[in-house]
């Protein structure tokens, strides 16, 4: 153990040596480490035999200096073993700074050996991870396509695949049998994909928006729902625009059919008006060339 005189001597001597700057880099580092321990622990500083030998050698001076005792393992506390006074020859390879003492780390048993890690086995680089993601994306795309095909043709009117034409008197699915794109307003009115309202001719269904009685309102809702069922379950739908029965020069204005266009709607080759009339959800309503008779509304008695 050190006493206060020993600590003061070695602290002073180490300071002188470091100020001289004549020692090698590792010697200065060793003395600096010992100085920090002395400043921190004072007389309670514990040094090994090797550290004591190196310290004595580096701090030799012409004047006498106190004897530094070393701490050794003692099997019997009542009979302490005397410290060895022999100077251990210095070898650079065996000098260990106090700062290098670290607790032993426990190796992860799941971590691959160093030999495999040196050659890249057991770890995956960012580039490899990027390439591994490509097959995963491809698989997801294939499953998405399979799912799309297995769902079949869309049955909603809004997602049909045939383009429309706004030319009066022409069919609106020129590409052949398919589904025209439109939405259903009520039992006898639809709206084309471009926003054009079309009044279906040849029949009249009960009003569901401005009914005259509750019976007409209920029947109007049934007619609208039935038209949606016919279109949704059809293989093909065809819309054809026709000339409205209006006075010349009023086509497309509020004075002609409330600004609506006129047309027919066929489901699987049959006019929807015929189906609704046969099921009691509509009545026949045929107009002339330039005018129509009074609208039939027999649902309120």
Image (tube, rainbow, N blue to C red):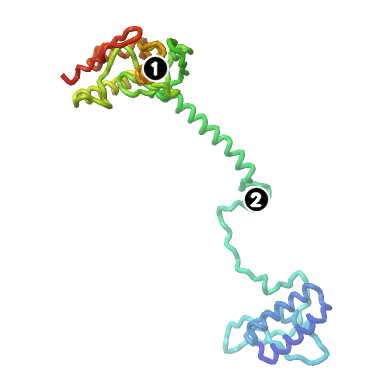
Kindly state the secondary structure of the residue where label 1 is placed.
strand
* Pick the front one: 43 or 190: 190
Q: Position of residue 225 (x, y in %)?
A: 29, 23
Point out the image quarter for the N terminus.
Answer: bottom right
Residue shown at 62% from the left, 52% from the top: 113
Q: Residues within 10 Å of mark 2 (few under 14, many from 20)?
A: few
Q: Position of residue 272 (x, y in %)?
A: 32, 14
* Pick the front one: 160 or 104: 160
Point out the image quarter for the C terminus.
Answer: top left
Residue shown at 27% from the left, 21% from the top: 223
Q: Position of residue 64 (x, y in %)?
A: 78, 92
Residue 26: which numbered mark, if any? Answer: none
| Residue 172 appears in the figure | yes
Q: In the image, 285: left or right of 256?
A: left
Q: According to the image, label 2 marks what residue?
A: 117
Kindly state the secondary structure of the residue where label 2 is placed.
helix
Between label 2 and label 1, give the one nearer the viewer. Answer: 1
* Pick the front one: 229 or 27: 229
The answer to whether 12 is drawn above or below residue 287 in the figure is below
Q: In the image, 207: left or right of 241?
A: left
Q: Position of residue 174 (x, y in %)?
A: 47, 12
């Amino acid at each position: 153990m050190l006493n206060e005189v020993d600590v003061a001597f070695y602290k002073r001597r180490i300071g002188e040596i470091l100020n001289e700057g004549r020692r090698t880099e590792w010697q200065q580092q060793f003395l600096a480490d010992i100085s920090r321990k002395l400043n921190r622990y004072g007389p309670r500083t514990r040094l090994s035999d090797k550290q004591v030998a190196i310290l004595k050698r580096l701090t030799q001076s012409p004047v006498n200096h106190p004897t530094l005792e070393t701490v050794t393992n003692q099997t019997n506390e009542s009979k302490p073993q005397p410290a060895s006074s022999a100077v251990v020859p210095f070898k650079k390879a065996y000098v260990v700074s106090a700062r290098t003492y670290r607790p032993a780390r426990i190796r992860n048993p799941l971590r691959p050996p160093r030999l495999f890690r040196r050659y890249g086995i057991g770890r995956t680089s960012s580039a490899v991870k990027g390439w591994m993601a490509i097959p995963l994306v491809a698989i997801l795309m294939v499953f998405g396509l399979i799912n799309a095909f297995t769902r079949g043709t869309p049955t909603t009117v809004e997602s049909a695949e045939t383009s429309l034409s706004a030319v009066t008197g022409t069919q609106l699915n020129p590409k052949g049998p398919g589904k025209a794109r439109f939405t259903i307003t009520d039992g006898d009115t639809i709206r084309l994909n471009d926003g054009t309202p079309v009044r279906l001719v040849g029949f009249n269904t009960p009003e569901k928006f401005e009914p005259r009685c509750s019976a007409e309102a209920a029947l109007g809702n049934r007619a609208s729902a039935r038209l949606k069922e016919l279109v949704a379950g059809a293989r093909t739908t065809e819309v054809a625009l026709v000339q409205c029965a209006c006075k010349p020069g009023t086509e497309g204005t509020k004075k002609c059919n409330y600004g609506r266009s006129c047309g027919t709607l066929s489901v699987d080759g049959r006019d929807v008006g015929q189906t609704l009339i046969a099921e009691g959800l509509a009545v026949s309503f045929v107009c002339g060339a330039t005018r129509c008779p009074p609208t039939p509304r027999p649902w309120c008695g």
